[in-house]
Image (cartoon, rainbow, N blue to C red):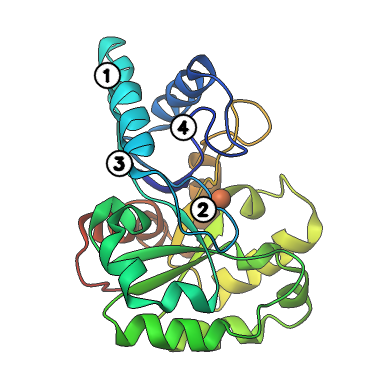
Amino acid sequence: MIDIHTHILPAIDDGPTTMTESLEMCRIAVNDGIKKMIATPHVQNGMYDLDANKVLEKIHLLNQLVKQEGLDLVIFPGAEVHLSDRLLDAEILKESSILTINGGKKYILLEFPFQWVPSGTEHVIFKLRSMGFTPILPHLERNFKIQRDPYMVRHFAEMGAILQVTAQSITGDFDAAPMKCALWMLKNNLVHVIASDAHSPVGRPPILSKALKVVSDKLGEEAAKKMVLDHPRMILEGLPFNT
Ligand SMILES: [Fe+2]
């Protein structure tokens, strides 16, 4: 499996604080059957100043430790990018390849708030698409407004956004509302990718297999595999998205 949304790097955002913790998360991922992982640290509020060298250095070091331990896992660069009009400044996206998945300047994981739906969301999706980027919207099922009005999710998908649901929402590890919304999205064919959004070895671990099992039971193995392998691979490799 490929996990496209993780906070696996130490001391860079609200993920693990030490390399020891990061490495523990890598062991959990490998045990779960995850072979590739994209590190997507948060980019500060509207300040697109993620230090690419710092991110790449941490990834390099973690990959070295993973290899030394004989773990079958590779970590790739990415970011979880604050959704705002400023992002549409062509220079920011052209110059900061660290803001796109695996530096591919194709897929961009947007940070989506939990309390409201930003008023410019459609504009940002539309503009990013016209600039040749494909936005990925994470964990809409955890958004309070969308839980009450899930139909807007379909609209985002029709505009060409990729919809990524958090594994723990599907398995009911959060609470009833995100689970209900995630299951509604699954039923309506509105989940393209399942990712862990892992933050720690304990509370928010990089585990996808439990959600894979739930989705396999509901929609069949082939559909479930697309969400944790085929679609994530297209995103990682910067290939055209094909459902
Ligand atoms: Fe995240």
17 to 235, vertically: above or below: above
Question: Residue 205's image quarter?
Answer: top right
Residue topped by disc 4: 9
Which quarter of the picture shows residue 162?
Answer: bottom left
Q: Residue 180 shows which numbered tag?
A: none
The spot of residue 217 in percent (x, y) is 52, 55
Q: Are marks 3 and 4 in contact (CB under 8 Å)?
A: no
Q: Residue at x 43, y 52 (%)?
A: 79
Residue 152 at x, y = what percent?
Answer: 62, 86
Q: Residues within 10 Å of mark 3 (few under 14, many from 20)?
A: some
Q: Which three-letter amino acid code belongs to the residue tagged 3?
A: Phe
Q: Disc 3 and disc 1: Cα gap in Å?
A: 13 Å
Pointer 1 local density, CA inside 10 Å: few below 14, some 14–19, many at least 20: few
Task: Work out how far the residue at label 2 is from the one at label 3, CA to CA, in angstroms.
Answer: 16 Å
Task: Please tell me which residue is depicted at 37% across the width and 80% down the height of the picture.
Answer: 128
Q: Mark 3 or 1 closer to N-term? A: 1
Q: Quadrant of residue 243?
A: bottom left
Q: Using the rendered image of the protein, determine whether residue 34 is visible from the camera's viewpoint.
A: no
In the displayed structure, 24 sits above or below 93; it is: above
Q: Which mark is residue 64?
A: 1
Mark linked to residue 43: 2
Q: Secondary structure at mark 4?
A: loop
The residue indicated by pointer 3 is 76
Q: Residues within 10 Å of mark 4 (few under 14, many from 20)?
A: many
